[in-house]
Amino acid sequence: MKSMLSRTWLSFLLACLLSFTTANLAHAATVKGPAPNFTLKSLTGKNLKLSEMTGNVVLINFWASWCGPCREEMPLLNALHKKYEALGFTVIGINVEEDTRNARGFLKNFPVDFPILLDKNNKVSKQYEVVAMPTTVVVDRDGNMRYLHKGYKSGDEDKYRKMVKKLVRE
């Protein structure tokens, strides 16, 4: 029991530290190169493959239910998705937790209209070298990564919006 409690406490502390660090040390970069392809199961049970999204601008957001900045960012991503969806844009949320109940609980409080995929083993997170929560990648219509943003702080969504507007016009 003591060992389990210690692990729970340690997990909580690590989650708080990561959440605090990523919120305060947001980092963005313009990137170029093919986005690693992946196939993941969605919360609805269907598989989604990134390569099938070619022709669309895709914002991939890696998130976790314990991530404080994710709570602030998720409704903003949903608004962005709704605004530009008709122009060939979509958001894909990738939850990085083993237990899908955490994602389902989170989404009851922060519902979204875009697909939520499950990366329970962090296979895709490793492909994208995710080291901060949340991490956002924008992929152009040709399947190339164009923007990478680690962490989130208020106002970062304006950077996403500018990138999306630029890419849907290309």
Image (spheres, rainbow, N blue to C red):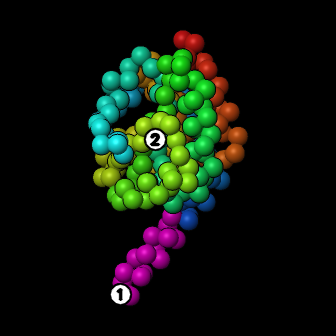
Amino acid type at image mark 1:
Met
Amino acid type at image mark 2:
Gly
**How many residues crowd mark 2 within 10 Å: few (<14), some (14–19), many (20+)?**
many
Give whichever of discs 1 and 2 has the lower sequence position.
1
Give residue 75's quadrant in the image.
Answer: top right
Q: Position of residue 160 (x, y in %)?
A: 61, 32
**Which corner quadrant holds the C terminus?**
top right
Q: Is residue 81 left or right of residue 103?
A: right
Q: Is residue 115 left or right of residue 20?
A: left
Outermost residue to the top: 170
The residue at the point 57 percent across, 23 percent down is 84
Picture layout, residue 169 above or below residue 4: above
- In magenta segment, residue 2: yes
Q: Residue 25: tell me if it is visible.
A: no
Number of marks present in the image shown = 2
Give residue 143's quadrant in the image.
Answer: top left
**How many residues crowd mark 1 within 10 Å: few (<14), some (14–19), many (20+)?**
few
Q: Position of residue 107 (x, y in %)?
A: 50, 51
- In magenta segment, residue 158: no
Outermost residue to the bottom: 2
Q: Position of residue 85 (x, y in %)?
A: 53, 24
| Predominant SS along the magenta part | helix
SS at circle 1: loop
SS at circle 2: strand
The residue at the point 49 percent across, 28 percent down is 90
| Residue marked by disc 2 | 93
Give residue 81's quadrant in the image.
Answer: top right
Q: Residue 120: tell me if it is visible.
A: yes
Q: Which segment did they paint magenta?
A: 1-15
Q: Nearer the viewer, residue 163 or 168?
A: 168
Residue 1: give its label: 1
